[in-house]
Amino acid sequence: MKRPIPKPSLARLPVYYRSLREAIATDLTNISSSELGRRAGVPAAQVRKDLSYLEQKGRPGVGYDAHELAGYLESYLGLVNEKEAALVGVGNLGQALVLYPGFGTYGLNIVVLFDNDPEKIGAQIGGRTIFDVDRLTNLMQRLGIQIGIVATPAGAAQEVVDAMIAGGVKAIWNFAPVRLEVPDDVFLKEEDLAASLAVLSHHISQLRIATENQEDAGDDKRE
């Protein structure tokens, strides 16, 4: 019986999968935990621990069969099954998500778009029609869509999510800068772009301070 996999380990599995696909593209047939970790930016011991939750073990001196492990991850993560999603909020970010070609690798297909801007309703992006957000619940029920992507302003996000859930959505990917409330049976993945930017900003700020300190130290020595 497989042990439950912790969320941090689960989040690393797609990174391992992408790294395996890249390795296979270079005709690599076997891959060690060290090499997989190097490609994924994860320590080898962590790679082995993460894969142990899936009962995947490499062979001593050989490593993992790259094709076999990639196939297992495809199945485990559900990448072999096409997943249809609806996106609400067709601003700059929403349009970028709609047109991003990499989602196809992971079986995600954004099939319908919604917005509340009269000038956008009825237009098409990437071959998908933009519908009035008022039709969200009804269309999601009719199409049987279970994944919702939120790219709206913060003030509209909770209302949109409530409408998605009423339409049968069971997983929500939120890009709006706000904390959302969902029932226990709905999975919520939140991408806080502002928080990520703050981390980057802090890192750059610390580098600048360190550089200034080094320059001041150099000036003191010259004096």
Image (tube, rainbow, N blue to C red):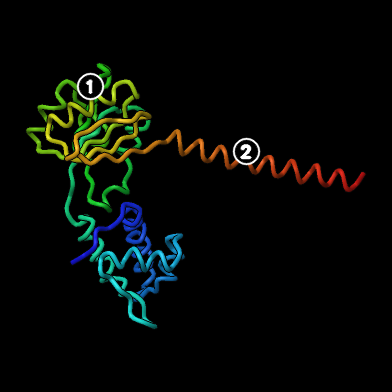
Q: Position of residue 84 (x, y in %)?
A: 18, 42
Q: Badge 1, how many Cα within 10 Å: few under 14, some, many 20+?
A: some
What residue appears at the point 39 percent right and 74 percent down from the top-left corner?
32
What residue appears at the point 31 percent right and 46 percent down from the top-left corner?
101
Q: Is residue 14 above or below residue 194?
A: below
Determine if residue 128 is in view. no
In the image, farthest residue toward the right: 223
Which of the two residues, 3 or 146, is positioned nearer the viewer here?
3
What residue appears at the point 75 percent right and 43 percent down from the top-left corner?
213
State the image quarter where residue 34 is shown. bottom left
Q: Quadrant of the C terminus?
A: top right
Q: Earlier in the sequence, mark 2 or mark 1?
A: 1
Q: Which mark is residue 121?
A: 1
Badge 2 amino acid: Ser
Q: Which mark is residue 205?
A: 2
What residue appears at the point 13 percent right and 29 percent down from the top-left corner?
166
Q: Which mark is residue 112?
A: none
Which of the two residues, 146 or 53, is positioned nearer the viewer here?
53
Which type of secondary structure does the marked residue at label 2 adopt? helix
Q: Badge 2, how many Cα within 10 Å: few under 14, some, many 20+?
A: few
Q: Is residue 162 above or below residue 70?
A: above
